[in-house]
Amino acid sequence: MTRIGIISDTHGYLDEQVFEYFKDVDMIWHGGDIGTPEVTDRLKKFKPLIAVHGNIDGHELRAEFPQDQLFKIEDCKILITHIAGAVGKYNTHVNALITREKPDILVCGHSHIVKVMKDPKYGFLHINPGAAGVYGFHKVRTIIRFSIENNKPQKMELIELSLRGKIS
């Protein structure tokens, strides 16, 4: 069993609650729009981190984190990218990756809209954890926690940190 914490769209703000909610995870995945290197530096000191850069990220973060991450956890193929498009309406770049790589889980960010659903065409689990930062149009700051057990996602939890305007 591998326990995962997913966060995205921090835009330079890392809520202290993340460290409590992710204390028992084995690794953290960041879906882009990190904002500042300090966010990922703190996460890397806390747990192993796999991250992608987002459209707001500057050259320093783009140099450290790629546009896409493709890897396996317990025979489960994971694709992380920042801008994927809507379920069933993926952008050209992501559609090509999906077709070629056939992931079991796609993690993305960008929209600031929480979405966890099975893609009806490809059959993978589409996960967007929403936005954990204080910038954007989202009303509630969110993260996701789950496990991969027997090569399948299990125990998916959506965690609401607070209203966007409230800083803990």
Image (cartoon, rainbow, N blue to C red):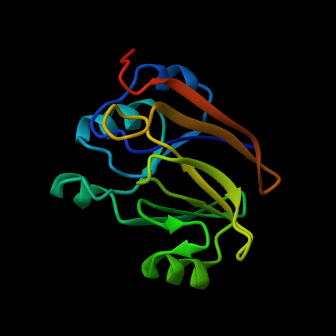
| Quarter of the rendering containing residue 168 | top left
Check the image and name the residue furthest to the right.
Answer: 150
Q: Residue at x 26, y 43 (%)?
A: 35
Check the image and name the residue furthest to the left.
Answer: 59
Rendered view: 130 above or below 117:
above
Check the image and name the residue furthest to the top.
Answer: 168
Rendered view: 138 above or below 109:
above
**128 sits to left or right of 66:** right
**158 sits to left or right of 10:** right
Residue 88, given in percent of the width and then of the height, sits at 61, 73
Where the N terminus falls, by quadrant? top right
Residue 49, given in percent of the width and then of the height, sits at 45, 45
Residue 37 in sight here = yes
| Quarter of the rendering containing residue 136 | top left
Q: Residue at x 61, y 34 (%)?
A: 25
Closer to the camera in the image, 77 or 56: 56
Residue 60, given in percent of the width and then of the height, sits at 18, 53
Rendered view: 14 above or below 35:
above
**114 sits to left or right of 3:** left
Q: Residue at x 57, y 24 (%)?
A: 21
Residue 22 in sight here = no
Q: Residue at x 27, y 36 (%)?
A: 12
Residue 46, given in percent of the width and then of the height, sits at 44, 30
Q: How many marks?
A: 0
